[in-house]
Image (cartoon, rainbow, N blue to C red):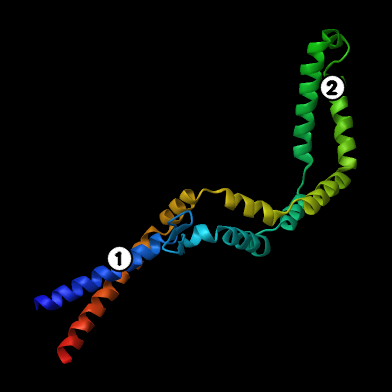
Amino acid sequence: MVELIIMIAIGSLIGWLTNYVAIKLLFKPYKNINILGFNIQGVIPKRINDIADTIAHTIDTELISIKDITSTINSMELESEIDKIVDDIVEKKLKGDLFNKMPMLVMFINNDIINNIKAYIKEAIEENKGEVVEVIIHKLESEVDFKKVISKKIKEFSLEDIEKMTINIAKNELKHIEYIGGLLGAVIGFAQFLITRII
């Protein structure tokens, strides 16, 4: 009976330890280490560039691409935003900067004139809004490599941060893997005990 308990305990420990080490080897060591001619490095640190490129490609092709963003911009109603921007600019430039530099202008430029200037600028922008948006969209689509941006951002993450995020997200699942390793080890230990008794 004691032998059975010992074999199950050893098998369980070996199974749990094997899975524990395997999980740690996903990230550790961060940098390549040469031990007796063998290069050892965590799977994710070693393949981080490929992982980043694959994630970026998946996001760009399956989730959201630069074309999705530009088509959304193209369909947006921008009138209220344009009004706010023009109001802010005119208020700041005329009532702020210009009046501060030339206080005498206050005598000649009243609110009616300022409102007329705003209306004129808004009208000019509204008349050419389609062309302006089209230029911006063309610029985005031709010059912004969405996949490259995502991939670069992922590669800029420190391996420590990636490890922490992964462990925080999959903490329970990783623990289950360890426990399953222990359980399988116990089953193997029990099987070995039976085999030694049969033989």
Q: Left of 104 or right of it: where is 67?
A: left
Can you tell which of label 2 and label 1 is closer to the viewer?
A: 1
Residue shown at 80% from the left, 22% from the top: 93
* Residue at image coords 90%, 36%: 124
Q: Residue furthest bottom?
A: 199
Type of the residue with mark 1:
Leu
Toward the left, the furthest residue is: 1
Disc number for residue 114:
2
Q: Earlier in the sequence, mark 2 or mark 1?
A: 1
Nearer-the-camera pick, 16 or 176: 16
Q: Return the residue nearer the eye: 23 or 95.
A: 23
Bin the neighbour count of mark 2 within 10 Å (Cα to Cα): few under 14, some 14-19, many 20 and up.
some
> Is residue 105 visible in this depiction of the protein?
yes
Q: Position of residue 141 (x, y in %)?
A: 78, 53
For the N terminus, give its image quadrant.
bottom left
Q: Secondary structure at mark 1?
A: helix
